[in-house]
């Protein structure tokens, strides 16, 4: 293990950043506080980043940053800061130290990934997911690792692998990692904040306190409404919910209180030094396992001075100074972010399939899992929703997925409104890929009909009435010796095409004519699952 640690290099780099602001600017895109083996050095590095954002990274300012966050004593006091300045070196040597620290951090990740491969093989399991994670971890390095010593650790029972334990699916598996930085980047109407609040409710059900930092809402009304809707949908009593949400705004002097959710509105103030220190104290005092940062771009924009999400330097300074300290305190952090629109035809609203909006430094910084949403049906408190959740990065490699068209499906968020008079409740859950497969095996004649209708309209190049659609569809069906389509099925198919922009309705006097906009192709295909011939067992 000693070969994977170089504390002198860590002391040299931190000391150099304390004495020369130019050095931090050179290394902030290479290394972060999570890369230091010595957690004290990571903590001081975070304080330097915060002081740099404020425009004064002097030794005194860094000491004050650590004092405000109650971290000064944990790093050894101001005398350690003074000692580190004596370890400073030249810009060239400091950059070399940063490269060394990053390489050793990568090698520790490689060793952990290799352990998981060997452990899975030793247990008689399929190591494919572990191998994917291992291959990913050696992309930027030579990757030579002594597997013999790792095998010995596994045999001796001294190795404990990191598993996702947050955001539970219907099959009991989880999607988010504890004590890691997790990210969901998704387009509008993808219910990403609903997913974050569902995670909070699940954590509270397990007896944990959670912190919700909202950078996009000023009063918390929407957050409260959605928490209430989800809780009622999960049959959580209003008495229990009130106990979880009521109580002091902060947790000073109330360790035994029933309060489990602490909501911080950061729309205008961002994560200031005072608020960040309060959040850190709360996370440490209550041993909070889960923190939501809702609105990455807003958090950066509301910073004082404002930071730009398109600049890797600003992203890395913000993460190093404000987010990774929360992770280092033991909380799994979920950052909720937007994605950039694709560079397609003007007017299109397609979104990129992978990256969050702004600098790629966001995705690079993820130490847990990065998720992406694909909206099948936009949902709300009063409308059903269905959103596919894909994995775009899984650093530990332990989220259970199913491969779909070269993508990694982690589950499907399904929401079903339950209207009970004036009470709005939402049954929301993350279905496992296996359950999704079972649902897809059910009859979906409406989508098969939708594809046939869409192709028919495209071939005709002119609008036709619903009656004409029914006649043409049934004629084609009868030619193949099968019974005609049910009227209800065709109505659902046409409604689907119109609702999602594949077709449009045009008025011709009192008649409604259906015209094609784009040709729709169903993921189910033209042959229904029940019509497919059985494969020969021979």
Image: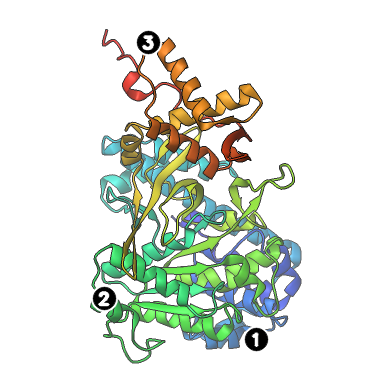
Q: Quarter holding the N terminus?
A: bottom left
Q: Is residue 108 left or right of residue 242?
A: right
The residue singled out by tag 3 in the image is 481
Q: Residues within 10 Å of mark 1 (few under 14, many from 20)?
A: some
Kindly identify which numbered label has been placed on residue 238. 2
Q: How many marks?
A: 3
298 over 248 or under it: above or below: above
Q: Nearer the viewer, mark 1 or mark 3?
A: 3
At mark 1, the secondary structure is: helix
First reached walking from the N terminus: tag 1 or tag 3: 1
Q: How is the image coloured?
A: rainbow
Give percent across and percent down for residue 268: 61, 80
First reached walking from the N terminus: tag 2 or tag 1: 1
Quarter occupied by residue 359: bottom right
C-alpha gap between disc 2 and disc 1: 47 Å
Q: Is residue 303 visible?
A: yes
At mark 3, the secondary structure is: loop
Give percent across and percent down for residue 22: 76, 70
At mark 2, the secondary structure is: helix
Please name the residue shown 55% across and 86% down the image: 274
Please name the residue shown 40% across and 58% down the image: 177
Kindly identify which numbered label has been placed on residue 295. none
Give percent across and percent down for residue 243: 28, 81
C-alpha gap between disc 2 and disc 3: 58 Å
The residue singled out by tag 1 in the image is 61
Q: Nearer the viewer, mark 2 or mark 3?
A: 3
């Amino acid at each position: 293990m000693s070969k994977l640690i170089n504390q002198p290099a860590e002391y040299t780099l931190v000391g150099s950043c304390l004495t020369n602001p130019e050095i931090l600017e050179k290394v902030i895109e290479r290394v972060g506080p999570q890369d230091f083996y010595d957690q004290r050095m990571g903590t001081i590095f975070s304080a330097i980043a915060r002081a740099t954002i404020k425009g004064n990274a002097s030794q005194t300012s860094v000491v004050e940053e650590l004092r405000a966050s109650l971290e000064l004593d944990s790093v050894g006091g101001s005398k350690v800061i003074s000692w580190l300045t004596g370890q400073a070196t030249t810009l060239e040597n400091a950059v070399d130290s940063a490269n060394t620290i990053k390489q050793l951090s990568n090698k520790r990740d490689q060793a952990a990934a290799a352990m998981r491969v060997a452990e899975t093989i030793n247990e008689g399991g399929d190591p494919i997911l572990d191998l994917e994670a291992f291959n990913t971890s050696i992309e930027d390095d030579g990757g030579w690792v002594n597997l013999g010593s790792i095998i010995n650790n596994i045999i001796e029972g001294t190795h404990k692998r990191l598993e996702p334990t947050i955001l539970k699916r219907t099959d009991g598996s989880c999607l988010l990692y504890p004590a890691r930085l997790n990210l969901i980047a998704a387009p509008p109407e993808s219910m990403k904040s609903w997913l974050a609040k569902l995670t909070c409710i699940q954590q509270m059900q397990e007896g944990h306190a959670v912190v919700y930092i909202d950078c996009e809402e000023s009063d918390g009304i929407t957050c409260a409404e959605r928490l209430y809707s989800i809780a009622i949908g999960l049959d959580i009593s209003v008495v229990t919910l009130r106990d979880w949400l009521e109580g002091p705004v902060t947790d000073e002097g109330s360790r035994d209180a029933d309060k489990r959710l602490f909501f911080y509105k950061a729309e205008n103030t961002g994560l200031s030094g005072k608020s960040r220190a309060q959040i850190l104290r709360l996370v440490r005092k209550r041993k909070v396992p889960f923190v939501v940062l809702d609105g990455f771009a807003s958090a950066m924009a509301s910073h004082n001075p404002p930071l730009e999400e398109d600049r890797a330097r600003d992203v890395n300074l913000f993460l190093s100074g404000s987010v990774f300290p929360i992770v280092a305190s033991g909380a799994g952090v979920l950052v909720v972010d937007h994605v950039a629109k694709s560079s397609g035809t003007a007017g299109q609203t397609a979104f990129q399939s992978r990256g969050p909006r702004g600098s790629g430094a966001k995705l690079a910084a993820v130490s847990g899992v990065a998720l992406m949403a694909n909206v099948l049906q936009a949902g709300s408190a009063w409308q059903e929703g269905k959103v596919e959740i894909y994995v775009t990065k899984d650093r530990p490699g332990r989220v259970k997925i199913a491969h779909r068209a070269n993508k990694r499906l982690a589950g499907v968020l399904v929401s079903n409104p339950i209207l009970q008079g004036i009470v709005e409740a939402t049954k929301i859950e993350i279905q496992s890929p296996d359950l999704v497969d079972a649902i897809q095996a059910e009859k979906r004649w409406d989508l098969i009909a939708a594809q046939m209708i869409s192709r028919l309209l495209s071939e005709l190049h002119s609008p036709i009435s619903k009656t004409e659609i029914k006649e043409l569809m049934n004629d084609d069906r009868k030619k193949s010796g099968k019974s005609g389509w049910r009227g209800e099925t065709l109505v659902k198919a046409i409604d689907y095409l119109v609702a999602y922009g594949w077709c449009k309705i045009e008025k011709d006097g009192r008649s409604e004519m259906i015209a094609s906009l784009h040709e729709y192709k169903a993921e189910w295909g033209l042959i229904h699952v029940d019509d497919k011939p059985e494969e020969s067992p021979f």
